[in-house]
Image (cartoon, grey):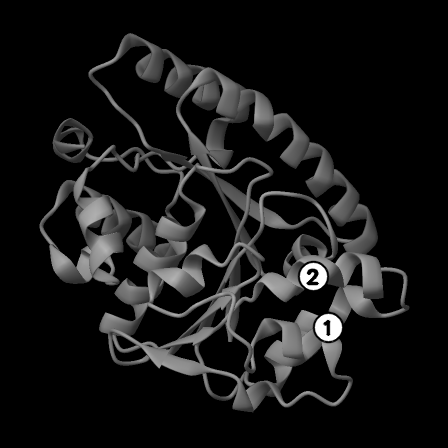
């Protein structure tokens, strides 16, 4: 099973949209895929119509119960082949209650090992702050996707994520493969274009050479509780995520995108 984490220490950059879109595309391609909501706010959980305030088995169970069965907490979501480990607001207390307990940084890694024969991919939607839950995700993943909105303040926030990755690399005793995904890009604005240029100038091949455009249809998809790639496969945002997934799967994420795709974004 391949494990991808989606994280940035800034909110509102498209983390949940990225997790949903890639998960739905993988499932539609026939890959059994698990989505894991690690954010106590539960945006991914709510996206699929589940209440983060409700009790029941989910990610909190894995941390709170020593002998938790990870195979029993998944709920199916659309499309077929996609499953979800739900978040709950109770996860906000984990840091205070369990953060100092030995071994808590590897809870998620051990839980995913229990279901490695059930899924081909797991995508982890992380909270926008460094803590127990993000540390678990970074310890468990093979690849980190960092969505970054193409605007000045979001670029400044990326510096915090860089420091976190340096710390994680030391603790893992090996570098973590990571790629920056430019999101919410509006090529019609000078500020957006300049921010994208600065991002690519500073981070080079770390930056995926496509962009995820601003697309109001993402809101429609969220209201419907479906991935935009399912609701409107030909939408600009859907085509952009399909291009991202193709590059991630082929290892060509740093190659220049065809001019036609850049223009359509």
Query: On screen, 23 above or below 147?
Result: below
Q: Which residue is mark 2?
A: 136
| Residue 54 x %, y % | 51, 73
| Residue 262 x %, y % | 20, 30
Farthest residue toward the top?
A: 190
How far is mark 2 from mark 1, CA to CA? 7 Å
User: Residue drawn at (39%, 24%), measured in percent from left and top?
Assistant: 150
Quarter in which the C terminus is drawn = top left
Q: Left of 70 or right of it: where is 243? A: left
| Residue 19 x %, y % | 40, 56
Q: Left of 131 or right of it: where is 238? A: left
In which image quadrant can residue 29 be found?
bottom left
In which image quadrant can residue 30 be found?
bottom left
Label 2 neighbourhood size at 10 Å, few (<14), some (14-19), many (20+)? Answer: many
In which image quadrant can residue 158 be found?
top right
Q: Left of 255 or right of it: where is 101? A: right
Query: On screen, 45 above or below 217?
Result: below
Q: Which residue is mark 1?
A: 107
Query: On screen, 189 above or below 172?
Result: above
SS class, disc 1: helix
| Residue 253 x %, y % | 39, 44
Label 1 neighbourhood size at 10 Å, few (<14), some (14-19), many (20+)? Answer: some
User: Residue drawn at (37%, 47%), measured in percent from left and top?
Assistant: 252
User: Residue drawn at (12%, 55%), measured in percent from left and top?
Assistant: 233
The answer to whether the residues at label 2 and label 1 have Cβ atoms under 8 Å apart is: yes
Q: Left of 173 or right of it: where is 79? A: left
SS class, disc 2: helix
User: Residue drawn at (31%, 80%), measured in percent from left and top?
Assistant: 81
Query: On screen, 128 above or below 118?
Result: above
Front one among 170 and 238 = 238
């Amino acid at each position: 099973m391949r494990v991808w984490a989606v994280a940035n220490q800034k909110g509102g950059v498209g983390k949940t949209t990225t997790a949903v879109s890639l998960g739905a595309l993988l499932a539609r391609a026939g890959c059994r895929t698990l989505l894991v909501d690690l954010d106590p706010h539960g945006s991914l959980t709510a996206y699929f119509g589940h209440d983060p305030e409700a009790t029941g088995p989910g990610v909190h169970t894995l941390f709170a119960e020593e002998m938790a069965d990870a195979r029993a907490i998944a709920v199916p979501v659309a499309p077929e082949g996609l499953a979800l480990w739900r978040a709950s607001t109770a996860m906000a207390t984990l840091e205070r209650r369990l953060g100092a307990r030995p071994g808590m940084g590897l809870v998620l890694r051990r839980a995913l090992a229990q279901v490695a024969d059930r899924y081909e991919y797991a995508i982890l939607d992380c909270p926008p702050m460094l803590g127990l839950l993000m540390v678990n995700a970074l310890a468990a993943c093979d690849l980190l996707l960092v969505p970054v909105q193409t605007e000045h303040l979001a670029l400044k926030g990326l510096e915090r994520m860089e420091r976190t990755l340096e710390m994680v690399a030391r603790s893992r005793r090996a570098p973590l493969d990571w790629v920056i995904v430019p999101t919410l890009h509006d090529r019609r604005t000078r500020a957006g274009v300049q921010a994208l240029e600065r991002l690519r100038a500073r981070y080079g091949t770390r930056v995926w050479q496509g962009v995820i455009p601003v697309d109001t249809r993402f809101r429609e998809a969220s209201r419907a509780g479906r991935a935009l790639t399912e609701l409107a496969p030909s939408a600009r945002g859907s085509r952009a995520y399909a291009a991202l997934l193709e590059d991630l799967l082929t290892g060509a994420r740093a190659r220049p995108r065809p001019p036609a795709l850049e223009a359509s974004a």
